[in-house]
Image: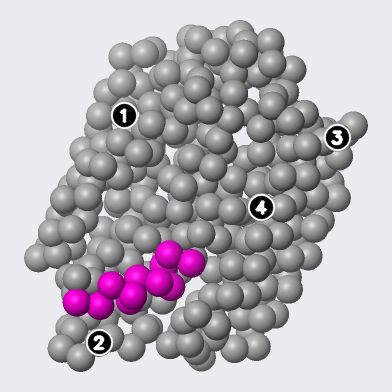
Amino acid sequence: MFNRVRHLLEMIRFSHTIFALPFAMLAAVMAWTTPPPEGYIGGFRWQHLAGLLICMVGARSAAMAFNRLVDRKLDAKNPRTQGRHLPAGILSVTSVVVFTLVSAAIFYLGTLLFLPNKLPLQLATPVLLFLLAYSLTKRFTSLAHFWLGAALMLAPICTWIALRGQYLSMHPWDILPAVLLGLNVLLWVSGFDIIYACQDYEYDVRAKLRSIPARFGIGGALRLAALCHLAMIGVLIALPLACPQLSLGWIYRLGITAVAILLAYEHWLVRPDDLTRVNLAFFQVNAVVSLGLFAVVTLDLLT
């Protein structure tokens, strides 16, 4: 049983929760520290923190397991992914289906911790369906990378709705900080997913799968990824200007500068004629970006 659980966590790359979770937690800090409208009763609650963690882990685990299920035959034909748990026979289809259903149930249970705010529970099904649908997008659109970005964009937006959604009907613009933070996530994730997909360029072309590298070539894909990350920096700069209530100062500006340097380094690592350092760019640099941005913005908000 221990080995099976370990293999399941390896299959969904549980450690990669680090990419989306910091932005959900950052949206939570922003929601807790933003001055509330008149009559709003909010603030930090331990049950809400638990709900965020449970929902994030449950939703991501379900989406990743579903991705491995629907892609298992494609993975078996791709030299880079033949060693994954399902094509290699390390895990059975039945065990992964059960894991997917259990993870989805955990996600639904997590939404109950936000009651009497019913929006998380009411939105749980469309959110989960949107996350699961990403796994099918590469079969019919080259914009699959942006669908993935939009899926992770939901993390800060759904966090905001869970914590402050009870009065959004009266103050719809209150969600603007989360939307801008989510747009930042969309551009960031789409950019680095395009870079990561360059590894599968030849297989995608051969298998007639849709991807940015397959459509525009590796050079064109890397240029589009760079544009995504440049736009991300623009959104980060716009955030305190559009949302002065956050009171972000010099610490935040220092953080933006550091993120810009890291993204420039990421694009320096990966070149059309040299993809050997894609994993370094994808895993290490982006982990520093997500955790670093969370730490810097949180420090600025709390000081």
Instruction: Give neighbour class at mark 2: few <14, some 14-19, many 20+ (Cα, 10 Å).
Output: few
Could you tell me residue 92's position as x and y percent?
Answer: 38, 12
Question: Is 48 on the left or on the right of 22, as rendered?
Answer: left
Mark toward the start of the polypeptide (3 vs 4):
4
Question: Is 160 on the left or on the right of 21, as rendered?
Answer: left
**Relative to 160, is 279 above or below?**
above
Q: CA distance from mark 2 to mark 3?
A: 51 Å
Q: CA distance from mark 4 to mark 1?
A: 31 Å
Q: Label 1, secondary structure: give it.
A: helix
Give the residues drawn in magenta, as a range: 170-180
Q: Label 3, secondary structure: give it.
A: loop
Which residue type does callout 3 highlight?
A: Pro
Q: Which residue is mark 3?
A: 272
The residue at the point 72 percent across, 45 percent down is: 224
Q: Which residue is mark 1?
A: 100
- Residue situated in front as seen by the camera: 4 or 134: 134
Q: Which residue is mark 2?
A: 37
Q: Label 4, secondary structure: give it.
A: helix
Instruction: Indicate whether residue 171 is drawn in magenta.
Output: yes
Residue 129 lies in quadrant: top left
Are discs 1 and 3 less than 8 Å apart at CB?
no
Mark toward the start of the polypeptide (4 vs 1):
1
Instruction: Give neighbour class at mark 1: few <14, some 14-19, many 20+ (Cα, 10 Å).
Output: many
Q: Which residue is mark 4?
A: 228
Could you tell me residue 12's position as x and y percent?
Answer: 47, 33
Mark toward the start of the polypeptide (1 vs 3):
1
Instruction: Indicate whether residue 174 is drawn in magenta.
Output: yes
Mark toward the start of the polypeptide (4 vs 2):
2
The residue at the point 33 percent across, 62 percent down is: 159
